[in-house]
Amino acid sequence: MALVTSACQTVTTVTIDGAEDGSGTVNVMVSLDEQATQALGDAAGAVVEDLTAAGWEIAEPSSADGSSSMSGTKGYSNSDELSAVLEEVGGVDGIFSDTFSTVESGFAKTTYAAGTTVTVTGDPAQFSDVALTQLLGGLALGRTPEEAAFEGLNDPGAATLVVEVNLPGLSEPSSETFDLTGGETRSATVAAESTISDSNVWKLLVIGIAGVVAGAVILVWGVRRRRVRA
């Protein structure tokens, strides 16, 4: 994330994609415009061995018209694992908190819910940490304040984060966009909920009711016939 925010124009999209059994995937896509690609280098040159070792599946980077992008996906089995995966993206005690993912089964329906609270400070240094700062010579992003200002690192809109939550039964994901630069703090919960009805249960119920009604009609008809004969 520190590398992503130290560019001219970047968009990072984090998508939580839930499945019917409560598991799912987290996909992170980083898109760099032409200037950002020139500043950071083409995405094809990114070193991803540490990501693959941590269980991320990294897609082949793509380039077009001077811009570039790359993405990675990691699965989760439950709410706790979803929180852990997002911590890998935004850091421990970082931008993601109060993450949840639930599946509740009721009569003839299943309700899905998932979400996370996103907090950004508007300062790219938020995505650094002690180890990275030491690695970069004591500078959070490897740049002095003057260098950061010259490169437009703190300009509003220089780097944005899009967080999406997609669940079974939704026609489109719930989404929020956050400005990672510009100095304004923002916190918002990105969440979604959906309900899927099981039509087969209702069909069986209707068939069952129809059977009971038919049985009652036959019983009444039989009683009346016996009375008539008597």
Image (cartoon, helix red, strand yellow):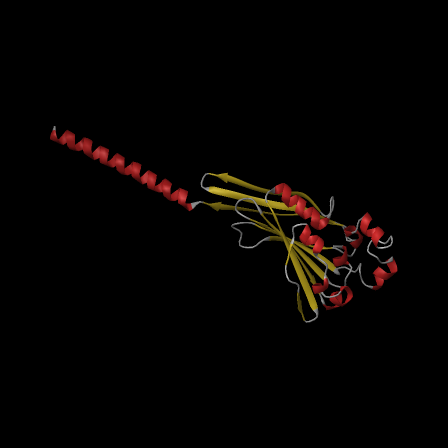
In terms of depth relative to the viewer, which is nearer, 178 or 129? Answer: 129
Q: How many numbered dots are placed on residues in this image?
A: 0
Locate residue 76, reporting x and y percent.
Answer: 61, 46
Q: On the rendered image, what quadrant is the C terminus found in? A: top left
Q: Quadrant of residue 212?
A: top left
Outermost left residue: 229
- The image shows residue 98, relative to residue 134, as above or below, that is above
Q: Can residue 187 be seen at all in this image of the molecule?
A: no
Q: Can residue 201 be seen at all in this image of the molecule?
A: yes
- The image shows residue 219, relative to residue 125, as above or below, that is above
Locate residue 149, reporting x and y percent.
Answer: 84, 61
Q: Residue placed at 23% from the left, 36% from the top?
A: 218
In terms of depth relative to the viewer, which is nearer, 229 or 7? Answer: 7
In terms of depth relative to the viewer, which is nearer, 61 or 193? Answer: 61
Q: On the rendered image, what quadrant is the N terminus found in? A: bottom right
Q: Residue placed at 49% from the left, 46% from the top?
A: 196
Q: Residue placed at 82% from the left, 63% from the top?
A: 151
- The image shows residue 159, relative to residue 186, as above or below, that is below
Q: In this view, does 145 lie to the left or right of 10?
A: right
Locate residue 24, reporting x and y percent.
Answer: 58, 48
- The image shows residue 66, relative to residue 197, as above or below, that is below
Outermost bottom residue: 65
Q: Quadrant of residue 220?
A: top left
Q: Residue placed at 37% from the left, 42% from the top?
A: 204
Locate residue 88, reporting x and y percent.
Answer: 70, 48
